[in-house]
Image (cartoon, rainbow, N blue to C red):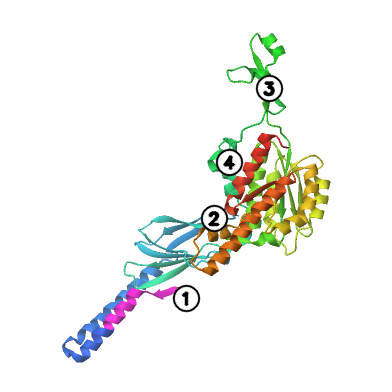
Amino acid sequence: MKRFFQNFYLNLFLTGRLFMALGALSALYLLAFFFPVIDVLPTVGLYVLVVLLGIDILLLYRRREGLHAYRHVPERLSNGDDNPIDIHIENRYRFPVQIGVIDEVPIQFQRRDVWFEIKLPIGGRKTLTYQLRPVKRGEYAFGKIQLYAQTPLALVQRRFTMGETETLPVYPSFIRLRTYELMAISQRLTDFGAKRIRRLGHSMEFDQIKHYVPGDDYRTLNWKATARQGQLMVNAYTDERSQSIYCIIDKSRGMRMPFNGLSLLDYAINASLALAKVVMLKDDKAGLITVSDRKGAVIPADRKTGQLSRIMEVLYKEKTRYLETNLELLYTTIRQTAKQRSLLVFFTNFESMSGMQRQLPILKRIAKFHALVVVFFENTELAKLTGRPAADVEEIYLHTIAAKFSYEKKQIVRELNLHGIQAVLTAPEDLTVNTINKYLEIKARQYL
């Protein structure tokens, strides 16, 4: 009994309709003071209100579990993507109820608007769905589900606390990864912006001998097979396989810069994961190296089962550091890890020509042994600034500085190309598509 009354006091709330009724009664009592003829009306009204209030409370507390609700969430959340969260609610009362629903989302989202109002008939069920977009990797703790039920009288509300507290990990963007996986399997990467690259010549990787069809290159005719079969046969070639592709991620302070909520490091992590998946679907080997002022994670290139899961687990834990990258240490790590010529996709961020020139000698040494692609980021905020017309002298000055930085980024691309290092300057949101484009281009041009 004591527990019942504790639950009653803690979970019973007055509604606006009750306060309106009390306000109307107060007005009647005030009028009755000036007009004694209506003296009986406020008293009758008070008795009626008390009776209705008692009925309302009795209806709400007659059943111990008038409502049932639970939350359905995925095993893990995808960073930078919209993740669906479902709340299932069932009405076990024998009358229709109006319900207010609050879900206690993780504190990282800083959201106070996860509120729903629904009406359920007798025995009715409903599923509420909303989206959460995390922008940082890590663990996110969900609280309880708070339900506020009221009868058709709507004088009071009863609160139900449902569901379980649960903690979910936020991993690099595996939702986008699945999308690129399906596109790669169906050869429809162009739907997401990946360009079709014209091939130069053909690969020398032999695939099979097949019957000649109009349009085949007559230079690939296999005369011995033609003589045996009595009809024209040609050699078919495919892209070279089992080539090693490494994603190298810079974890220095320059990668802490945020764009649309995500840091540059998280953009690089999501792009690396998508590229690794496409690489393995193309029968190449995917590897990973992370670096900052000290040696980070190293996963040798491979395409065996579980390689992508290992890469994802490593990327889940990576964080930026506050010092500059030690490229000499990176050079040593690459020499120890990549024993054969490989494609190295280096995700970093150059903000100035002088910053790039400090690292250029080491990049040139790496490019002697491997095909090196340096991927760095365009400052989209500066691009927006230069795209607006200047209204005063101060804005003209700001436009000039922004144009200088934008031009310097393009100069960095040209400087790297002059030294045999391929460069990709991209907006953060286009990073994944542009990185996959560069990989497909290198495969088509046979640069590796």
Q: Nearer the viewer, mark 4 or mark 1?
A: 4
Q: Main secondary structure of the magenta part?
A: helix
Classify residue 76 by image quadrant: bottom right
The kind of secondary structure element at disc 4 is loop
| Residue at the disc numbered 1 | 10
Q: Nearer the viewer, mark 4 or mark 3?
A: 4
Classify residue 35 by image quadrant: bottom left
Q: What is the CA distance from the residue labelled 2 to the residue labelled 4? A: 32 Å
| Residue at the disc numbered 2 | 73
**Residue sitting at 64 percent across and 46 percent down?**
435
| Residue at the disc numbered 3 | 208
Q: What is the CA distance from the residue labelled 4 to the residue labelled 3? A: 28 Å
Residue 194 is marked as: 4
First in residue order: circle 1 vs circle 2: 1
Magenta range is: 2-25
First in residue order: circle 3 vs circle 1: 1
| Residue type indicated by callout 4 | Ala
